[in-house]
Image (cartoon, coloured by chain):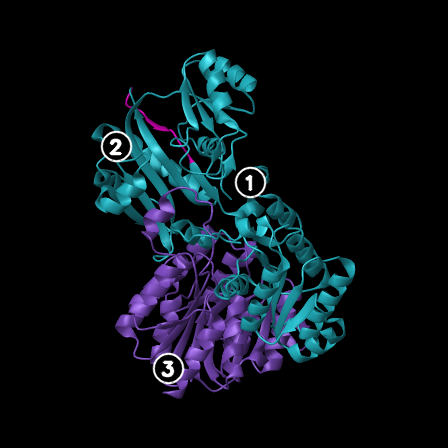
Chain colours: A purple, B cyan
């Protein structure tokens, strides 16, 4: 099994006719993903390398039975594209687009929660999700990932997601699903959503968590792990030696209350029983030990 | 994008918030002329992107020409938190009866907006937050609903403000929330929000961080970006469109992707070196971006070696190798380079690089060994004073975490 997607997931690309949408859409199809539709308001009836283009997601759902969407439209169009996908009837929406304003993200997430609580949003500004050998939605180079499990990966950083897949593949360890949640202020799917899904997934036996400094998502993940996860978790937090930045205002400090530094995150995760590697390679080595002892 | 105080006040005033009349001045003569127009008493305030201005002597009251001139002379050129004061804001002095705190920002954990309001505003608000968190009334706001009047009224009551200003506070907070949302701010903060001798709520300081991602719908943002201070290296990198943060060490870092760049900085530190910078060249690694990155890093006089850390995902190893080879043919790089190349078609890329390898371009088998090689190269390359000074190190703080929260 896998989380969020599998070999039966049928995907519509919003932005398939654009440069990036076409490039990654076709790469994802070559990987084996069921990329069965694209959308463009004025190009209905055309196709992209054989993939039919519809005017709206609703039309694509009616004609092809897609249940997931991958969004590559420019940032200003993202809120409308997500709304169209949710109203059109897909259950899983991946937004690759970066540069979406924070207030648009906050409104989009709140609207989904209110009007489409059954819809899962991943992103914006994320590399997507890959279940090696089954489905790849987004911009991950599929062949760096080794299929089969037993490790599930969740990561806040794009390139470190690839690094994690690479470290595991080098050691002959497969991955059930790798979710890049992105580092934007309002991620549609967060660490806890993924940890809960991995806990439920019988094929996933251990979880690799890649975090970074800022915010308190890793600390909250640590609390969740302590209470709800029976499976071992290995982590790496990027930014251990990040310098002091320019500080503006007090609100951030009041909200975080001292959380957010790499040290605070490592401490919280360690207290929750998570083994934390000092760099991505070290985390991979720890995971190899964990997998060997399963 | 952080605004200076006077920019923040102009931003607030454009949404109808009550601010004091004032003018910008760049020298004592301008400061005096401004004060004469505004009318005494005035306050002379340093305009820098840093907190703690009052404690650093950057804010002085003045009641006549001589005082304005002396204050302006004293403040201009001051170093406040590493920022040299070059700009002043001359403002009509206010009569302060009470000091409150008000702010809105995103609560990332709740994925909703958070309003914070306290009757104990002023310079020590963070201490209040740490020692008496109940003194800060908080309200979570659903972005689809906004700040409803009734909820705002309860919030004001919770904060324990002087009941005489409750109605004013509800109105002011509604305007502040509007500025936060419609202005696409990541943060709006008024500290202190004062009650004047006449019993009026008034904005005495302004902290505003705007979301650069929203600049497509705010043409006015461009003017703010011009006043953002960057050091010379950062200015150069910014002009070339690179994500660069200057650090204090000797090992230059170039990586593709922000997370990998951060991990590279970590791993250099772990190997016993001190990174000179953080530089993310983004997903690809073509010759243009690579030569620009190499020039920026090599242009830093403290740099003694350069660690290029590339993980090819969609970008193939051959393309990365071609980019590096062409970049090196275009620019003359003084420091020895250590390259780590992994990912898609890494073997092919490494093979292409083989004829170009020398003492000044070496290939490492993995990330950890690359860091060790780069650190050793930096240590053996330079032993002069600048290296010792550059090794002073960096410190972690809450501010680092906040920096991490900002978007690239």
Observer-side mark, 2 or 3, equals 3
Q: Is residue B50 above or below residue A270?
A: above
Magenta span contains residue B268: no
Q: Is residue B240 above or below residue B341?
A: above
User: Could you tell whether B18 is left or right of B306 in the image?
Assistant: left
What residue is disc 3 on?
A201
Local crowd at mark 3 within 10 Å, few (<14), some, or many (≥20)? some
What residue is disc 2 on?
B166
Identify the disc placed on residue B228: 1
Local crowd at mark 1 within 10 Å, few (<14), some, or many (≥20)? some
* Mark 2 and mark 1 residues within 8 Å of each other at the beta carbon: no
SS at mark 2 in the image: helix
Q: How far from the left and from the top, in percent, is residue B162? A: 22, 30
CA gap between label 2 and label 1 equals 36 Å
User: Could you tell whether B76 is left or right of A15 in the image?
Assistant: left
Q: How far from the left and from the top, in percent, is residue B53? A: 42, 33
Chain part drawn in magenta? B198-206
Q: Residue A116 versus residue B259: which sits nearer the camera? A: B259
The residue that appears at 30% across and 39% down in the rendered structure is: B125
CA gap between label 1 and label 3 equals 48 Å
Q: Quadrant of residue B226?
A: top right
Question: Can the viewer see residue B109 in this picture?
Answer: yes
Single out the residue that lies furthest toward the right. Answer: B329
């Amino acid at each position: 099994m896998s989380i969020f997607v599998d070999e039966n997931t049928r995907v519509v690309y919003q932005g398939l006719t654009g440069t990036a949408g076409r490039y990654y859409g076709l790469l994802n199809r070559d990987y084996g993903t069921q990329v069965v539709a694209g959308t463009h308001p004025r190009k209905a009836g055309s196709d992209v390398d054989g993939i039919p283009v519809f005017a709206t997601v609703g039309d694509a759902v009616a004609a092809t039975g897609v249940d997931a969407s991958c969004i590559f439209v420019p940032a200003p169009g993202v809120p409308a594209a997500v709304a169209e996908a949710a109203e059109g009837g897909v259950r899983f929406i991946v937004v690759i687009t970066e540069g979406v304003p924070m207030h648009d993200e906050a409104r989009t997430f709140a609207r989904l929660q209110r009007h489409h609580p059954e819809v899962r949003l991943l992103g914006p500004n994320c590399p997507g999700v890959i279940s090696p050998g089954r489905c790849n939605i987004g911009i991950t180079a599929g062949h760096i990932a080794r299929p089969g499990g037993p490790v599930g990966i969740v990561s806040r950083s794009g390139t470190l997601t690839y690094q994690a897949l690479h470290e595991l593949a080098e050691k002959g360890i497969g991955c059930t699903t790798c979710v890049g949640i992105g580092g934007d202020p309002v991620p549609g799917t967060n660490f806890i959503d993924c940890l809960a899904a991995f806990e439920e997934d019988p094929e996933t036996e251990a979880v690799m968590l890649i975090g970074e400094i800022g915010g308190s998502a890793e600390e909250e993940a640590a609390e969740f792990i302590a209470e709800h996860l029976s499976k071992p978790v290995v982590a790496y937090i990027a930014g251990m030696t990040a310098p002091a930045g320019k500080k503006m205002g007090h609100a951030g400090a009041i909200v975080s209350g001292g959380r957010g530094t790499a040290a605070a995150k490592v401490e919280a995760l360690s207290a929750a029983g998570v083994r934390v590697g000092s760099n991505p390679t070290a985390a991979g080595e720890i995971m190899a030990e964990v997998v060997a002892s399963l | 994008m952080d605004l200076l105080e006077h920019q923040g006040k102009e931003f607030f005033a454009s949404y109808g918030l009550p601010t004091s009349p004032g003018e910008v001045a760049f020298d004592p003569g301008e400061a005096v002329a401004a004060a004469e127009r505004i009318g005494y008493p005035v306050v002379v305030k340093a305009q820098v992107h840093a907190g703690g201005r009052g404690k650093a002597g950057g804010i002085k009251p003045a009641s006549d020409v001589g005082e304005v001139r002396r204050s302006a002379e004293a403040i201009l050129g001051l170093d406040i938190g590493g920022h040299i004061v070059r700009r002043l804001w001359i403002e009509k002095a206010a009569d302060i009866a009470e000091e409150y705190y008000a702010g809105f920002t995103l609560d990332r954990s709740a994925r909703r907006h958070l309003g914070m309001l306290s009757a104990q505003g002023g310079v020590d608000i963070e201490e209040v937050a740490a020692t008496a968190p109940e003194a800060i009334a908080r309200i979570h706001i659903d972005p689809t609903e906004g700040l409803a009047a009734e909820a705002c009224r309860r919030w004001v009551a919770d904060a324990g403000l002087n009941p005489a200003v409750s109605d004013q506070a509800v109105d002011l907070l509604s305007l502040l929330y509007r500025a936060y949302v419609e202005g696409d701010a990541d943060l709006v903060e008024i500290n202190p929000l004062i009650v004047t001798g006449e019993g009026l709520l008034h904005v005495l300081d302004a902290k505003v961080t705007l979301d650069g991602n929203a600049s497509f719908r705010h043409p006015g943002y461009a003017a703010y970006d011009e006043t953002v201070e960057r050091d010379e290296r950062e200015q150069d990198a910014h002009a070339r469109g690179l994500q660069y943060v200057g650090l204090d060490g000797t090992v230059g870092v170039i990586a593709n992707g922000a997370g990998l760049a951060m991990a590279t900085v970590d791993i250099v530190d772990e190997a016993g070196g001190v990174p000179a910078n953080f530089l993310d060249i983004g997903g690809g690694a073509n010759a243009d971006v690579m030569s620009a990155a190499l020039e920026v890093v090599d242009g830093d006089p403290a740099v003694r070696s350069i660690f290029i850390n590339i993980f090819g995902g969609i970008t193939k190893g051959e393309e990365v190798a071609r980019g590096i080879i062409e970049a090196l043919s275009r620019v003359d790089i003084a420091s020895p380079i250590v390259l780590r190349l992994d990912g898609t078609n890494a073997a092919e890329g490494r093979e292409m690089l083989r004829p170009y390898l020398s003492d000044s371009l070496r290939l490492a088998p993995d990330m950890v060994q690359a860091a060790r090689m780069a650190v050793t190269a930096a240590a053996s390359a330079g032993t002069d004073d600048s290296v010792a000074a550059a090794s002073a190190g960096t410190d972690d703080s809450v501010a680092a975490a906040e920096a991490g929260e900002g978007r690239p």
